[in-house]
Amino acid sequence: MIMAQSVNHRDLGPHLPGTSSPEAKRRVERAVHDEQLTAQVFLALLLVHLPPGKILMSVDRTTWEHGDAPLNLLVLGAVVHGFTIPLVWVALDHTGNSDTRARMWLVLRLLEALPARRWKGLVADREFIGAEWFRFLRRKGIRRAIRIRKDTVLDELSADEWFGELQPGQFRMIAERTTVFGESMRVVATRSPAGDLVIIATDFHVWETWQLYKLRWTIESTFGSQKSRGFDLERTGVTDPRRLERLFGLVTLAWLACLRVGVWRHEAKPIRVLAHGRKAMSVVRYGSEELRHVLRWVPKRISEILHVLICPFPALGQPETEVVSY
């Protein structure tokens, strides 16, 4: 997958070693039929890469279509180095928003392996609201920073009535905790430069809330780099829910290898910053380039790369303990 930058079996086949015919190599698609590739296997392989300390979690869906078949994955993961590492996921058997039971089930699966004391909190968009959901998170000891809709009732007034006059760039909060879906929480708001009202129900302090909620977009960055900007996940012809979950797990492992090597490489040789202030490429792309180069042209460095891949990410905000020159 890393070499082909694709999940399509026709793209993967030519990269497999051996003298088998192209038709035989296309049977690589059978990997997603293997029932030994369970959610527990993927979770165990992913958890060992997490950095020490408390970790922010993010939840969202990624959707696309294959012909007339809608594909809908609910994903919960850890925010690390500008991306969200998917840890648990489920293929929904319907289009549109997830239901509360599916979200709760996903959180419980992760809590079995990663207790709430390791969670800094959970950030989520407006889809992830509701009294039962908010109450569940509190009872599990998970702090929340969740965007709510402008028609949400807060102490007998809608959120839009509380913050309707807010101008772009301004920040405001309700002075005291208020009841949000039956839970006592802080409510803070701002208006984006585009004019959208962003209202967040939170258990964090005001300024910490903004810093954490901005990291919600890291899960969108992950989906983008697994799809059109990376492994072309949307080209898959896999529509069976269980097989789709296995394929997503395999893509996540390949994607994580790129992220891990990218973070390591960036510490040694930072990504170039362009004139407009943005980096020339993402850290995932940076790692992908290095991995493909080594795998194709510099086999003597494979052991060095494998050493990186078996080490967890450094603590967030800390440099790598070992810097390798190029």
Image: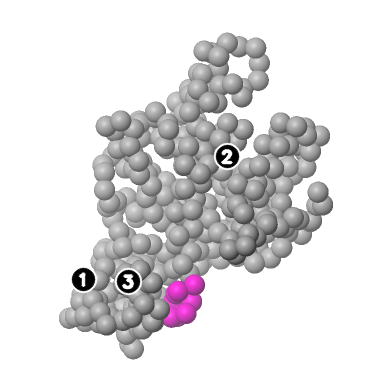
Residue 254 vs residue 284, the one in the foreground:
284
Residue position for label 2: 254
In the image: residue 204, left or right of residue 28: left
Q: Is residue 106 above or below residue 191?
A: above
Q: Is residue 306 above or below residue 29?
A: below
Residue 92 vs residue 142, the one in the foreground:
92
Hey, which quadrant is residue 240 in on the image? top left
Measured in 3D between alpha carbons, the distance from the residue under mark 3 to the one under mark 1, in whole angstroms, is 16 Å
Task: Give the secondary structure at mark 3.
Answer: loop
Q: Which residue is drawn at 65% across and 12% down?
A: 19
Q: Nearer the viewer, mark 3 or mark 1?
A: 3
Question: Which amino acid, by three-letter code, is at mark 3?
Answer: Gly
Res. 64 in view: yes
The mark nearer the N terminus, 2 or 3, is: 3
- Circle number at residue 151: 1
Question: Where the N terminus falls, by quadrant?
Answer: top right
Measured in 3D between alpha carbons, the distance from the residue under mark 2 to the one under mark 3, in whole angstroms, is 38 Å
The mark nearer the N terminus, 3 or 1, is: 1
Image marks 2 and 3: residues in contact by CB distance under 8 Å: no
Task: Where is residue 65? Give x, y as percent.
Answer: 33, 37
Task: Give the secondary structure at mark 2.
Answer: helix
Question: Which amino acid, by three-letter code, is at mark 1?
Answer: Asp
Image marks 2 and 1: residues in contact by CB distance under 8 Å: no
Task: Where is residue 185? Give x, y as percent.
Answer: 34, 78
Q: Residues within 10 Å of mark 2 (few under 14, many from 20)?
A: some
Question: Which amino acid, by three-letter code, is at mark 2?
Answer: Ala
Q: Residue at x 27, y 51 (%)?
A: 97
- Circle number at residue 3: none
Q: Give the range drawn in magenta.
A: 204-211
Q: How crowded is mark 3: few (under 14 residues within 10 Å), some or many (20 or more)?
A: few
Task: Where is residue 279? Give x, y as percent.
Answer: 61, 58
- Circle number at residue 195: 3
